[in-house]
């Protein structure tokens, strides 16, 4: 076992070993306590309906699914105290068009947040990958450029069955979840900016 030259105790030995001059060494280096506790600022958005409107862009492609996502979002909005008059809906052909509609809504200045709802189901071709990729990066870019929460409520699944599971059956309703993310993020940004 390696011995420490100064204290004659094992280097990795007992932490409370008595030193060669008979003084009890502290277990760990003791730091002076600060006079006041350090108060950290911490932000976390709450699920409260903002005073501004919420914009929802929803695609018609796979409308049986996207309509359920929209219903879930509206249900969540009312559940958290929102009024129907505070919601505006823009319908677009497919998920590929969601970013452009979201950008127009964001630029209007009327909305506290934008929710994008769509459903892309994998087919036999690579079309799915292009639509998913365009929708994902486009929606994210609108959020970063506008500084608004622009929420990705687009289902990307292998089958229609998986999509229905996420649109109000056994895996919840992603439209409702997307709306809640919009509430949380708009409240978070409000706190950070104030
Ligand atoms: N759009 C969707 O929203 N979901 C899909 O599954 C889909 N598929 O599979 O093709 C889809 N395609 C259309 C696309 O979003 C555009 O509307 C179209 O390419 C015109 O720009």
Image (tube, grey):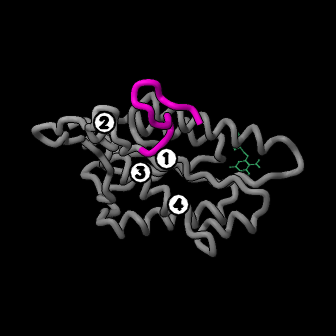
Q: Is residue 99 above or below residue 83?
A: above
Measure how far apart labels 3 and 4 are at the Cα level: 11 Å
Measure how far apart labels 1 and 4 are at the Cα level: 10 Å
Give neighbour class at mark 2: few <14, some 14-19, many 20+ (Cα, 10 Å): few
Q: Is residue 85 left or right of residue 8?
A: left
Kind of element beneath mark 1: strand
Do residues under tags 3 and 1 come within 8 Å of each other at their CB atoms? yes
| Rendered image quadrant of residue 74 | bottom left
List the residue tagged with mark 4: 175
| Rendered image quadrant of residue 40 | top left
Q: Is residue 73 above or below residue 117?
A: below
Kind of element beneath mark 2: loop
List the residue tagged with mark 2: 29
Q: At 32% across and 41% down in the image, what residue appears?
A: 189
Give neighbour class at mark 4: few <14, some 14-19, many 20+ (Cα, 10 Å): many
Stretch in magenta: 1-14
Considering only order in the chain, which callout, 4 or 3, is on the residue closer to the N terminus?
4
Between 51 and 36, which is closer to the camera in this rendering?
36
Measure how far apart labels 2 and 4 are at the Cα level: 53 Å
Give neighbour class at mark 1: few <14, some 14-19, many 20+ (Cα, 10 Å): many
List the residue tagged with mark 1: 151
């Amino acid at each position: 076992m390696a011995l420490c030259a100064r204290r004659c105790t094992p280097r990795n030995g007992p932490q409370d070993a008595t030193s060669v001059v008979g003084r009890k060494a502290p277990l760990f280096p003791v730091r002076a306590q600060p006079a006041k506790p350090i108060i950290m600022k911490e932000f976390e958005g709450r699920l409260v309906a903002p005073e501004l409107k919420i914009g929802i862009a929803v695609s018609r492609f796979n409308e049986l699914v996207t309509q359920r996502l929209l219903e879930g979002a509206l249900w969540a909005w009312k559940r958290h105290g929102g009024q129907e008059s505070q919601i505006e809906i823009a319908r677009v052909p497919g998920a590929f068009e969601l970013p452009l509609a979201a950008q127009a809504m964001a630029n209007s200045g009327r909305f506290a947040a934008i929710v994008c709802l769509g459903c892309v189901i994998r087919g036999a071709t690579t079309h799915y990958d292009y639509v998913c990729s365009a929708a994902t990066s486009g929606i994210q870019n609108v959020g970063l450029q506008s500084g608004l929460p622009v929420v990705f409520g687009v289902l990307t699944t292998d089958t229609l069955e998986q999509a229905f599971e996420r649109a109000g059956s056994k895996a919840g309703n992603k439209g409702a979840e997307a709306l809640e993310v919009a509430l949380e993020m708009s409240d978070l940004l409000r706190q950070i900016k104030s």
